[in-house]
Amino acid sequence: MPSADYRTLVRANYRRLSQSIQGFSPRREQNYLIAEIGKVLLGHYDNTRRILVAEAGTGIGKSLAYLQAAIPWARLQQKKLIVSTATLALQEQLVDKDLPLFQPHCQPGFRFVLAKGRGRYCCVRRLEALARGDGQFSLFEATHALTAPQQRQLAELWQAWCDNGWPGDRDSWPYPIDDALWQQLQAEPHSCQPQWGHQRCPFHLARAELDKADVIVVNHALLLADLAMGGGVILPEPEQCVYVLDEAHHIAPVAREQGSARLALGPGRRALEQFNKQFAGLHELLGTEGQHQLGQLQQAIQQLIPALTTLGQQFNGALQRQELVPDEQGCLRFAAGELPGFLDEALRVLREDNKVFGRALDRVQGQLAEQLKRQPAKAAVIEAALAALSQQRLRAEQTASLCELMLSPSGPKKTPPARWLEQSRQELTLCATPLAVGHLLEQWCWSRAAAVIMVSATLTALNDFGYFRRAVGLKADDGSHYLRLHSPFDYRSARLIIPPLACDPTDAGFDRLLAEQIPLWLEGQGASLVLFSSYRQMQAAAEALRAKGHSLLVQGEASRQALLQLHKQRCDGNSPSILFGTGSFAEGLDLPGHYLTNLIITKLPFAVPTSPVEQAMAEWITLCGGNPFMQQAMPEASRKLIQACGRLLRTEADHGRIILLDKRLVSRRYGAALLAALPPFTRELP
């Protein structure tokens, strides 16, 4: 494709779009971002590795920029554009606002669709069976008695489906669907395969729409789940895709979560025992030709149950002898990835027995699928059996992942996974999480994709891309291009105030100081947001302020949407409104204009290394001769602080103040680096 043709298309699309927007004002930074994305896509920086990492500050309009640059190139190259986000709010913005805005003005034309996880769709077989009280359904799947309100809602859902008034996804139902009811209705992996004849399955109908779409909007979890399976399972294969990863600073943590595994020893054993009791029904369904495979499966179960039992007994014995001592939260981390002596051999046995079980499951599942074709009259009970087998397959896959992570060899150049044991109510759960996921992302996506554009308002930490680059597996000289565009906002219109304080967050009297300081900075203010580093501290401050007569909207006491709606109502009525929130309110919260003019940050967002993953990461950095505080805690705190401060200015006309109740920014040596990374607010320092 000649670059001139592509550039001509982009310019023409931009002209049509700008003419359609009343009062349109060109943004220099947005135009520069469009141009740089175009250069990367055309291979100007590296013809073999089209990867851009772009930090684009608030107000640039990065979503419209990457849509204008990427859609024409993807269409001309006959590739799919996958736009992945971390938050539902950004997905809704893309699907409800940005894509419909650009679509009429774009050449070549395009179709777009939102891809959602399987769990957002109902399984029509389950819906029908529950609505009709089909006893066959419960032969193989656990069901729970429904309350009267749940039964009424179930009847409404079934009737709407029969009348073609509901497409079968949870998000399109006009009212909240009860969680417990939805758990019994939702589609699950390995069930409802298209070859089983479900032309009206909501999940597979939605998946069919993906084939017709040119632009697919997804979340990071769904994208990485597909990539972890090799790509092309849910979404198109990476080689056929141009990826735009918005809110890209979430990619590494989501990849780490995607690679995690857990094995609850007691529940896992009991699930197998319960499954073993269902064999009478399976005997009837499989007929004579399937009895051999069924016998192999039963034998595999009878090997796997003792393997889980032995593992649990060995752990319990070590705990009783105090050879293993969990902390107060019931967590026991295996330091440096070193496993107890008995665990290595027990896991190897479990891994092999689980492989045999998985193969036997596959054979029986194949036989049942054949029976479904031969005996359509028994479709409901056969599909219920297939779904039960699918649940066991999921458990087998999770067990296999756990064993691999636990048994993965460690070496001087290999980052070991975080490995730990959780003890709760006499139940034991083995857990493992990979610490380094960069090589996985390289293998899954970077080395395979047609192009990758990563954007976010916060990709640098301490004014450098190094922290992000290491986290996602990029190298400084691998051909990836980096771009940093500052927000067009006038940051000097906002004041950053660090008051002189008697103590800092490490002192015992800090909670009392917050109870005294926060009311001082709320006095006379209209719209305030107070951000805390922990729920405990937020609750303590809320209790103290309410005792003084303050009316507060506190995270967790109502849904996020309800709190924000009430906050805006108060602001629109010229009444003071005070929002209290924790870390999740420091990102993605959009309160422009008079909805936020007074932002209070109670302390620097340093993560407390209490989780096994954080502890393992710090330990590994230390073992490699590094400094966990400077290499992990500081960059992450810098990024989170910039995000928190970013709640204040959301439009070019916004103004206000930020009060940071943490004197460590001026009293500790590292404070200067954190301050230097912040936007150029007008500073009032002690």
Image (cartoon, helix red, strand yellow):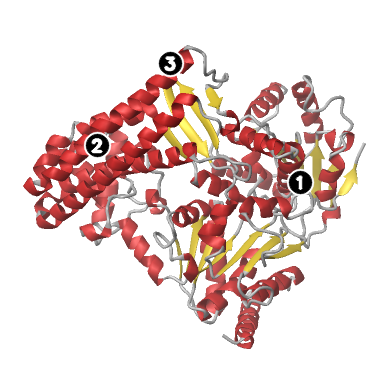
Location of the N terminus (image quadrant)? bottom right
In the image as oriented, which residue stretches furthest toward the right?
Answer: 686
Q: Is residue 610 visible?
A: yes
Residue 431, image x, y percentages: 48, 33
Q: Quadrant of residue 59?
A: bottom right
Q: Secondary structure at mark 2?
A: helix
**Crowdedness near tag 3: few (<14), some (14–19) or many (≥20) residues, C-alpha within 10 Å:** few
Q: Quadrant of residue 608?
A: top right
In the image, is residue 160 above or below residue 26? above
Q: Is disc 2 in contact with disc 3, using a CB cutoff of under 8 Å? A: no
Residue 602, image x, y percentages: 75, 34
Discs 1/3, front:
3
Q: CA distance from mark 2 to mark 3?
A: 26 Å
Which amino acid is tagged 3? Gly
Q: Secondary structure at mark 3?
A: helix
Residue at left offset 53%, top offset 53%? 220
Q: Which residue in the protein does label 3 denote?
A: 317
Residue 576, image x, y percentages: 71, 39
Residue at left offset 58%, top offset 32%? 612
Discs 2/1, front:
2
Which amino acid is tagged 1? Thr
Which mark sits nearer the N-terminus, 1 or 3? 3
Q: CA distance from mark 2 to mark 1?
A: 64 Å
Per the rendering, the mark at residue 300 is 2
Q: Which residue in the protein does label 1 denote?
A: 597
Which mark sits nearer the N-terminus, 2 or 1? 2
In the image, is residue 223 above or below residue 559? below
Per the rendering, the mark at residue 56 is none
- Left or right of 460 in this view: 499: right
Residue at left offset 50%, top offset 36%? 432
**Crowdedness near tag 2: few (<14), some (14–19) or many (≥20) residues, C-alpha within 10 Å:** many
